[in-house]
Image (cartoon, helix red, strand yellow):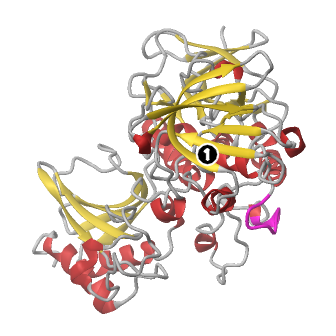
Amino acid sequence: MPDEPLDHLVIGAGPAGLQLAHFLERAGRSHLVLEAGARPGMFFTTFPRHRRLISINKKHTGTADPELNLRMDWNSLLSDDPELLFTRYSDRYFPDAEDMVRYLADFAGTHCPRIAYRTRAAHITRDGAAGPFRVTDERGGTHTARRLVVATGFGLPNVPPIPGVETADLYGTAPTDPSDYTGRRVLVIGKGNSAFETAGNLIETAAVVHVAGPRSLRLAWRTHFVGHLRAVNNDFLDTYQLKSQNAVLDGDVRRIERRPDGTYLVTVAFVRADEVTKDIPYDRVIVCTGFRMDASIFGEGCRPELAIQDRFPALTPAYESVNVPGLYFAGTLTQSRDFKRGTSGFIHGFRYGVRALHRILELRHHGVAWPARDLPAGPGPLAAAVIERVNRSSALFQQFGVLADVIALDGRGGARYLEEVPAGLTGPPLGDGADGHFAITLEYGPDHDRHDPFDLSVGRISQSDANRAHEGHYLHPVVRFHRAGAPPTVHHVTENLENEWTSEEVHVAPLRAFLARHLAPAAV
């Protein structure tokens, strides 16, 4: 008799795989994690190349509330163990990558006993359109499961199709010792954190460093997307603007020619000069243009549709492949849901996405109801519940616009308050929508990245004017009422510098009035 398929097979023992494995273990579900490396978190043994994380580690927040503290702790995974907080592993605001490797090893050793190390998934097939998944590893072993969750992170560099790019160095393999570049002219292709991390490392030794890319440079402090260039990596910009031989080139690299002496001649078409083209000599070229998913292990019949230049799997709001039922994704591979605007690519975001995924798996496949609490469907109790959550929740704070608390009305004067439901999810656990539901998110305003946040002459919104709450640029609560067959109605809660929405006049009373307008007269 063949072995009974596992409930869930997880590929990858990085942060997302470990987070899900912990939830599966706690729920008593049969599962196994396949990990190609000899230890968990292998990505962090190599990346970032210069070993400083850009995920913050704020130990001293002024509060003992563990939920609020997670808003400022971008590295911890979710568990009930107070010893397994990343803040116990480093005192540094931007910690060393080795601290993450150590932390993940301890988390796995405590919470994740079902990991098969040195077991690289080589090929994935499926027995029919609805049958179990079969994963063959590199040693020829086979593993079957009813559901497959891919949490591998990126498997390949994202290399742009530039003629001659194969002769350049890649971010993942280029030497990191600055002395290797002494007196050299260096081109770094890319305008993200890896590019500026690389360029910044060469300021003291290279003769000239150019950072090139066709799109405008985007700064995280302006866009509020933590994957855009962070201040911790932008020292290089001083050397450009203050004329220290370095430069940021707003242009499209058209061709890379490696010459017989090992140097390069690179053709750049400048965007700001009507695509004037110039051939520029360099001694070294380093490509820092991000990563992409490796989809080569998927066989016919279970190959997921890809999105965003084939870099990510295309997903439903349930983190499931849009074309392969039962194939789910976790971690940084879920970025198609909030690409270049949210936090699904980072631990402090996807840890909550993984928790939502686990709740979906429990609901769909094990009959476990979404965690919820019952409330009377009156504007007072509902407003109090919303205010309590937006002032404390770390999930809504970090997964802004991606996860929503939901108040589902039962039409009989009652309501159920469900926490952290993926925005856009339909059906269970929301019900049929006949009586409607409220969705509560934290969101930035639509124009939040269109002006300089340090320019005090523009974008000023009074934090005491509830009538202008919808004009707010910065993170604030948004409540929507949804009813089947009708467009949603929207209420904004006025933004607040300290993210404290407690004023009866400015925050609570207007919310209570909005809720009252959408409740049955008997409930009011």
Q: Looking at this view, is 92 or 21 the one in front?
A: 92
Q: Residue furthest right?
A: 179
- In the image, taking residue 158 as reference, residue 413 lies left or right, namely left
Q: Looking at this view, is 189 or 105 the one in front?
A: 189
Q: Quadrant of the N terminus?
A: top right
Within 10 Å of disc 1 (Cα), the crowding (few <14, some 14-19, many 20+) is: few
Badge 1 is on which residue? 27
For residue 79, say whether it is visible.
no
Locate residue 150, reporting x and y percent: 59, 30
Locate residue 67, reporting x and y percent: 59, 70
Q: Main secondary structure of the magenta part?
A: loop
Locate residue 268, reporting x and y percent: 54, 32
Residue at 32 percent across and 79 percent down: it is 494
In magenta, the rendered stretch is 87-95
Locate residue 49, reporting x and y percent: 77, 43
Residue at 43 percent across and 32 percent down: it is 308
Residue 57 falls in image quadrant = bottom right
Q: Quadrant of the C terminus?
A: bottom left
Residue 376 falls in image quadrant = bottom left
Indicate whether 389 appears above or below 301. Answer: below
Say how many tags the image has.
1
Q: Looking at this view, is 143 or 28 the one in front?
A: 143
For residue 513, say whether it is visible.
yes
- In the image, taking residue 505 as reference, residue 249 lies left or right, namely right
Indicate whether 76 appears above or below 71. Answer: above
- SS of the residue under disc 1: helix
